[in-house]
Image (cartoon, rainbow, N blue to C red):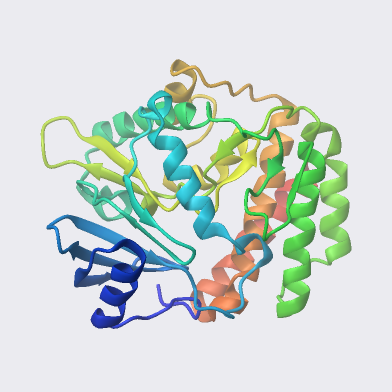
Amino acid sequence: MQSLTKRQLSAPELDALLRAATGVGCRLEAELTDGWFNTAYRVRFDDGRPAVVKLAPPAGAPVLRYERGIMATEAMVYRRLAAPADTAVPTPALLHSGADFLAVSVLEGTPWDKAAEHLPPATAAALRHELGAITARLHTITSEDGRFGYPAPEADLSAADWPTAFTAMVEAILEDAERWRSDLGVSAAGIRALVAEGGRALDEVTEPRLVHFDLWPGNIFVDHARDGARITGLIDHERAFWGDPAAELVSLEFGGDIGPDSDLVAGYVQAGGRLDFTPALRHRLALYGLYLGLILVVECGPRGYTGEHADWTRTFLGERVAALRALG
């Protein structure tokens, strides 16, 4: 997906950047165009290792507030996942990182959205079960400082409790919406009222857990070329925050059923995760869907998205607003 936030470098420029930062140059093999925010290149280092290099937007490029410093957030997540206790979550290895780039190892397999049409229903169901288990293990990772919200200090969107952090996250995206004159289809005051009404449900979240918040099929790699398809890794952790594990379901829904009887939830619970579909949890899910809808609409401004995609984001947000209002 083409975006105005993507930073383009020539092969010599990319080689010079990595050589200066890491001492190892590279040969550019291809640009990976599936990303929606950062630029990504497939490269081969001078020592022979293949890698994917991600570049942060150019200095001065307009980004949403929560996007400030998210390259460092992604590097932090890779480091946490590399810790001995967290190796059960498959993901690329972090090879190098800097203020405006990171390099990771190349995963086997293909993104799930590209493999989906080749997966028999039984295989897809087994993969959803495995994805639930992987997600449960991801959610065992807790914030080291005990704070909720986005890790990057540049965003300044963290707090000691979840209701305060989540309210600040919503407020930040509403401020971005005003800046970009985004058509939300509902007033900012109306959004704030919906969030305030969910305060009691948000109070139930008392421990900050790692939430990827972008686990749509394009960010999940699967290997289906051998007997017994498997998930080979989760990528693109830059949207991660510390919060309610249930928030993960709103992006996981892009890949299939997330209901209490789904394969995904069965795998999640069997791996030790907890998802009790109480009225409070369902209310929180509606709030997180609203938040994701706001992000999808507002990011169209700085990224330059128009046409069919922009129309879809407004429809998505409208449905989430309606769902939240229906809760009464």
Quarter the C terminus occupies: top right
Can residue 263 be seen in this snapshot? no
Asked whether 93 or 112 is in front, the reply is 93
**Total marks placed:** 0
Q: Is residue 2 above or below residue 245?
A: below
Question: Which corner quadrant of the image does residue 256 belong to?
Answer: top left
Would residue 57 be visible to someone looking at this image? yes
Closer-to-camera residue (296/316): 296
Residue 240, percent from left and from top: 55, 47
- Against 173, residue 242 (above or below) is above
Q: Which picture quadrant has residue 61?
A: bottom right
Taking the spot 43% from the left edge, 78% from the top edge, the residue there is 7
271, 161: nearer the viewer: 161
Q: Position of residue 316 (x, y in %)?
A: 60, 60
Q: Residue at x 42, y 28 (%)?
A: 86
Q: Nearer the viewer, residue 221 or 70?
A: 70
* Relative horizontal placement of residue 214, taking residue 16 as reference (left or right): right
Name the quarter where the N terminus is drawn: bottom left
Asked if residue 230 is positioned above or below residue 45 in the image, the reply reads: above
Residue 41 rendering spot, x and y as whole percentages: 29, 68
Q: In this picture, is 206 found above or below 169?
A: above
Q: What residue is shown at x 59% (from left), y 30% (from top)?
A: 142
Task: State the image coordinates of residue 267 (x, y, percent, origin top left).
Answer: 42, 23
The answer to whether residue 153 is left or right of residue 83 is right
